[in-house]
Image: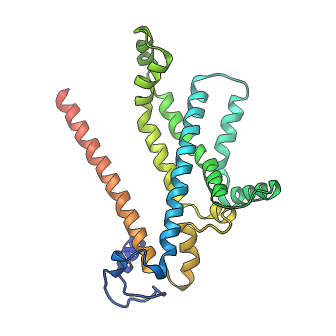
Amino acid sequence: MVPIVYTFVFSFNDSLKSNITWRGFTFDKWLNVCQVQNGAVCEAFGNSILIGVVATVAATTLGTMIAIALVRYRFRYRSQTSLLLFLPMATPEVVLGAGLAAQFLSLGVPKDMSTIILAHTMFCISFVVVTVKARVASLDPALEEAGRDLYGSATQVFARITFPLLLPGILAAALLSFALSFDDFIITNFNSGAVTTFPKYIYVSAARGIPAEANVIASAVFIFALVIVVTAQVSRAAKEKRLAKQG
């Protein structure tokens, strides 16, 4: 917690370019986080949000379909496919980043935001597959059979029974993917070209002291994540309490 507290406290530091020493308390950084002289931090943050959202949507969609296929269907090289999907999770990021960079270079693909999105999607798919696959495997087949017994089509059974049951796992996978994408530096640094993301901006700024504006954004992201976690826990506790009363 100490680094988080430090980041939060120094987001109120009345500093200019350097944010290493405490110079006084001010709300100016929170009120003018995207000021003209330091607008690069907001641009980097916006890039990270955009990359994270696009990579999350792509990885979650593809990963969910792959997870369902691996659990529900039997096909040749099924075990080999699972192994290939799990490899990115066990491979160091520096190896993945360098490998993707070499691949883009050999194909003549210019490094920009699209290469970052592609790289993030590729390593996030593995985490989505693992998360959703566990959810698919835990489903009760009797529920889907009941839907088919009531003359529901395959589309209706999936939309009204299977997908709602998978949704908690899909949402968890999406949140994990976004967090991994937003936080990634190593793979991004290999494949970003001139595009600056928030972690890359923090790394470059660290030598002279991370600007207070960056601390503001980092603190806001932490508070937002904390609110989501607390809300989810409160909602879960309320649901369990309600079910206990009904039982």
Q: Residue furthest right?
A: 106
Q: Quadrant of the N terminus?
A: bottom left
User: Which of 117 and 203 lies nearest the eye of the viewer?
Assistant: 117
- In the image: residue 51, left or right of residue 78: left
User: Which of 31 and 92 lies nearest the eye of the viewer?
Assistant: 31
How far across and down, in percent of the image, does residue 51 sit?
A: 55, 56
How far across and down, in percent of the image, does residue 163 sit?
A: 44, 29
Q: Please, is residue 31 above or below residue 119 in the view?
A: below
- In the image: residue 99, left or right of residue 225: right
Q: Quadrant of the C terminus?
A: top left
How far across and down, in percent of the image, does residue 122 sit?
A: 64, 48
Which residue shows up at 52% across the image and 59% down it?
Answer: 182
Q: Please, is residue 133 above or below residue 16 in the view?
A: above
* Quadrant of res 74: top right
Which residue shows up at 50% across the image and 29% down it?
Answer: 136
Work out whether residue 32 can be spotted.
Answer: yes
Q: Residue furthest bottom?
A: 23
Which residue shows up at 56% across the image and 29% down it?
Answer: 68
Q: Residue furthest left?
A: 245
Which residue shows up at 59% across the image and 64% down it?
Answer: 185
User: Which of 207 and 233 lies nearest the eye of the viewer?
Assistant: 207
How far across and down, in percent of the image, does residue 197 sit?
A: 56, 66
- In the image: residue 109, left or right of residue 209: right
* Quadrant of res 245: top left
